[in-house]
Image (cartoon, rainbow, N blue to C red):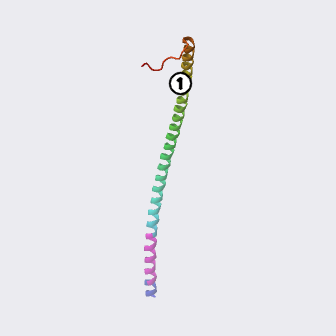
């Protein structure tokens, strides 16, 4: 009987050791999962910040594009006005104005 008890006790010790190892591994995995979750949250925050910066940069670029288009329209309008002025002066003078003096 004592051999059976000794054998059972030895089996229990082995199982206990295995369970303690499994518990330690489980706790380690849980800690890693918590760290991964924390990193994922930090990455999500960085991604959100980057998305906000990108949206702001896009809005600024669009504003600058509109500004450039307005400036282009103004330059084209001024060019047309100057061309019309040159045309009128040429009509008044009777000949084209010399572009370059020799």
Q: Secondary structure at mark 1?
A: helix
Is residue 17 rendered magenta in the image?
yes
**Residue in the foreground of this view, choosing between 29 and 17:** 29
Q: Is residue 44 above or below residue 62?
A: below
Q: Is residue 60 above or below residue 48?
A: above
**Residue in the foreground of this view, choosing between 20 and 30:** 30
The residue located at (43%, 87%) in the rendering is 3
**Residue in the foreground of this view, choosing between 8 and 45:** 45
Is residue 32 rendered magenta in the image?
no
Q: Is residue 36 above or below residue 69?
A: below
The residue carrying mark 1 is 75
Please report the bounds of the magenta region as a residue range.
Answer: 7-21
Q: Quadrant of the C terminus?
A: top left
| Residue 45 horizontal/vertical position (percent) | 49, 46
The residue located at (53%, 33%) in the rendering is 65
| Residue 94 horizontal/vertical position (percent) | 55, 13
| Residue 29 horizontal/vertical position (percent) | 46, 63
The residue located at (48%, 20%) in the rendering is 99
| Residue 93 horizontal/vertical position (percent) | 54, 11
The residue located at (51%, 41%) in the rendering is 54
């Amino acid at each position: 009987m004592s051999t059976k008890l000794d054998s059972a006790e030895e089996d229990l010790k082995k199982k206990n050791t295995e369970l303690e190892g499994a518990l330690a591994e489980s706790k380690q995995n849980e800690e890693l999962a918590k760290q991964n979750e924390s990193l994922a949250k930090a990455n999500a925050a960085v991604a959100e910040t980057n998305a906000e910066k990108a949206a702001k940069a896009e809005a600024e670029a669009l504003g600058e594009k509109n500004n450039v288009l307005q400036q282009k329209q103004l330059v084209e309008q001024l060019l047309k006005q100057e061309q019309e002025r040159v045309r009128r002066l040429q009509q008044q003078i009777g000949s084209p104005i010399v572009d370059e003096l020799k």
